[in-house]
Image (tube, rainbow, N blue to C red):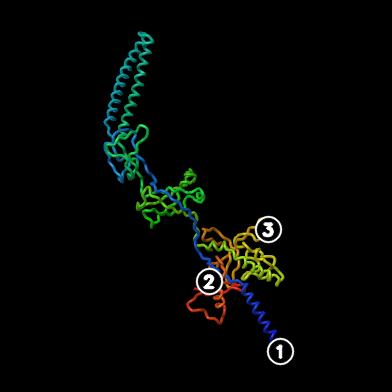
Amino acid sequence: MKGKRILISGGMLAVVAITLLTVHSCKKSKSYIYETSKVTKGSIVNTVTASGTIEAITSVIVGTQVSGIVEKLHVDFNTQVKKGQVLAELDKTALKSSVQQSLATLENARAEMEYQASNYERSKALYEKNLIAQADHDQARYNYEKSKATLKNSQAQYDKALVQLGYATIYSPIDGVVMNRAVDEGQTVAASFNTPEIFTIAQDLTQMQVEADIDESDIGMISKGQRVEFDVDAFPDEKFAGTVEQIRLSPVNTSGVVTYTVIINAPNPDKKLLPGMTANIVIYVEEIKDVLTVPYKAVKFTPEADYLARLGREMASARDKNGATGGAGIPGGTGRLAGGMSGPGSGTGAGSGMRGISGGQLPEGFTPPEGFEMPTMVWVKDEKGIHPVRVELGSNDGDNAEVKAGLKEGAEVVTRMTLATANEKKEQEMASNPFMPAPPGRRNTRSTSSASGTNSSARN
């Protein structure tokens, strides 16, 4: 009887001990909640934004080379004009007088030249017969040559007066539309020091251009032919298309900020775009379509230090059991970090040596050999838990990165992990208990993991 009591007491002590150990272990174990995203096909798009001014591709400022009063205007704002069409006329009274004066001077010079020519011919004949002195002959020839020069000068003055008279009638230099009229009838224009502006004519408003100011930090990504989208305040819900036509090399320094002017052609068949409008521009400097993409948060994700430490101990334990470094250690892995990097070398606190394997940082105490490049890792979640996978990435747009190798479409990558709350632990235990039915109206949306493995918890 005494031995039986001892046996019962021993069994009860064992049960109590096992219970205490289990409770202690449960207190120490931590559960995690993972936020994941699937690897999907998508596009990587990088853009440069800027603002610019819409202008006509060709616009001509029409002025006058002579001074006078504007006598007649033949066109107004928005008038369609043809090349050679009369736009305006200045008062020609003074100019016609100058022409008449120049003509009179010309006729006088011509008469003088004819007289001196006859005189020279007579002098020449007499000089050949030795009837006059050499000095008289030379004087006659001098007067004749001088009269010819005077005639040429008078002819030039007369031609100039005719040209000035022609300038009083202003013609359109191109086909286009009058964008601006700067004078009114009766107004006096003076062309003494500069050419007064009379009209501004745009050649073709169905083809416009945007002069965009691109910051010096972005100009290196801009190249000719890139696709452009822009909008204007007048049509906020409409997108206009264009392409980069020219990158001007001349810098523009405004208050210490250096920008470069980029010319973007902008078809305008409906003539909705008007000169002077401000355009909000998006230049597509890189477009990669229909490729596998992974959220960039997954590339930067690194598990919690406690989880890495536990993972390192499991790897070390697996190596001790198998007696080699090739034993299975990472849940869902192979005992070596995906991509060929070995795990920690000791079983105590080994997790600290694994930090950074997904974030692009070298493990503590690891001295890379010459030419070594830290592999890019992401953490993939499957039915066995989460484990790192080496990937080869291409371009990224800050939100997503192009996956060239290492992942397949549909794979779940971890973007964030947090400690589970008490309620979430309870839901996890209920979900893992086969005898406890799941509450109605709930569905699995997040997954939790503890030291004993990975389970799904039911959450709204």
CA separation in Å, label 1 and label 2: 51 Å
Question: Which mark is in front, 3 or 2?
Answer: 2
Question: Which mark is in front, 1 or 2?
Answer: 1
On the image, which quarter does residue 335 sit in? bottom right
Residue at mark 3: 367
On the image, which quarter does residue 237 sit in? bottom left
> Which residue is more in the foreground, 335 or 172?
335
Which residue is drawn at the image coordinates 54% and 76% (left, top)? Answer: 427
Q: Is residue 167 above or below residue 427?
A: above
The amino acid sitting under disc 2 is Arg
Give percent across and percent down for residue 300: 57, 61
The amino acid sitting under disc 1 is Lys
Most distant residue in the bottom direction:
1
Task: Tell me the quarter of the image containing the N terminus.
Answer: bottom right
Whether the residues at callouts 3 and 2 have beta carbons within 8 Å, the answer is no
CA separation in Å, label 3 and label 2: 38 Å
> Which residue is more in the foreground, 418 or 249?
418
SS assignment at label 2: strand
The amino acid sitting under disc 3 is Thr
Which residue is drawn at the image coordinates 62% and 71% (left, top)? Answer: 331
Question: Which mark is in front, 1 or 3?
Answer: 1
SS assignment at label 1: helix
Q: Which mark is residue 4?
A: 1
Q: Earlier in the sequence, mark 3 or mark 2?
A: 3
Q: Earlier in the sequence, mark 1 or mark 2?
A: 1
Q: Residues within 10 Å of mark 1 (few under 14, many from 20)?
A: few
